[in-house]
Image (cartoon, rainbow, N blue to C red):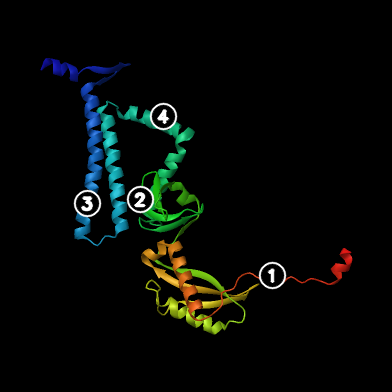
Amino acid sequence: MDKFKAVLEFRLIDVAGYQLTVVELGSSLAILLIAIVLSRNLSNYMTRILTARSRISPMQLYTFNRILGYAILAIGVLVSLGMLGLSTDKLMLVVGALGVGIGFGLQNIVNNFVSGIIILFEKSLRVGDFVELESGLLGEVKEINIRSTLIRTLDNADILVPNSEFINNRVNNWTLSDDERRFLIPFGVAYGSDPQKVQDVVLDEIKKMPFTLTGERREPSVLMTEFGDSSLDFDLVVWLKGDNVKRPGLIRSSYLLAIHKALIDNAIEIPFPQRDLHIRSGLTSVAK
């Protein structure tokens, strides 16, 4: 027993009046570990309780769990440092040193952390939103973490984007206020085609597609836009909702195939680029 007590009281550090024993280090690590486990399990427990007993929205629940987890970890770190024998004065020295470090190289980390807190409270970005970044990245928000946001692209690739990019740059959130979005599908037909017939046959085919929204404000339409170089140009305007908004490539392909079917079934010619070449007879004499 005495040997075990001696091991626990063994001084790992004894410098300038500061002493750190094995039991103090072990207690500090144990508290930190408990804080990590508690932050995860308590968040899951609160999710089940709040989901069953209240009408809290998923985004509010996500924000609450994140903030609760961060608070528990912060308290755990402070208590853990206290177990190491760091008094208030010493903690202030650590904070001061950390401030110097932030000034020299940690400003990006702090910037991303603060940006993450702003995103959670501002609710301008939510888990499940479909976003397009200024860099061209397109995908669905899966997680909003302390430093970065996880976005899953259409190729099923997980991309970690620093939170500051959502604050400092322009972000196109396709599903912020609702999950309805308008798609514009351009196409053309050959000169000599009846524009009214083109509109009618394409609309009839488009309305058969299950994901086309219809209604007073969301009725699909076919608009003639201009007289092109070799075609009469039209735009198909359709509205989509839900998960269909998050599959722009597949949706565009489906509508193009439907347009092609409607035109072919009704003997409407699909144009191809044409160039007329005029040969002047005077060129022959010049060549001789």
Residue underneath mark 4: 97
Q: Amino acid at mark 1?
A: Arg
Q: Position of residue 73 (x, y in %)?
A: 28, 40
* Residue 70 numbered mark, or none: none
Q: Nearer the viewer, mark 4 or mark 1?
A: 1
Secondary structure, mark 1, is loop
Question: Does label 2 or label 3 sit earlier along the sequence?
Answer: 3
Left or right relative to 193: residue 120: left
Disc 1/disc 3 C-alpha distance (Å): 69 Å
**229 displayed left or right of 136:** right
Residue 174, located in which quarter of the rendered image?
Answer: bottom left
SS at circle 4: helix
For label 3, the crowd category at 10 Å Cα-Cα, with few meaning under 14, some 14 to 19 and many 20 or more, is: some
Q: Nearer the viewer, residue 97 or 220?
A: 220
Dot 2: element: strand
The CA span between labels 2 and 3 is 18 Å
Amino acid type, label 3: Met
Residue 143: numbered disc? 2
Measuring from the top left, give residue 261's x and y in whole percent: 47, 75
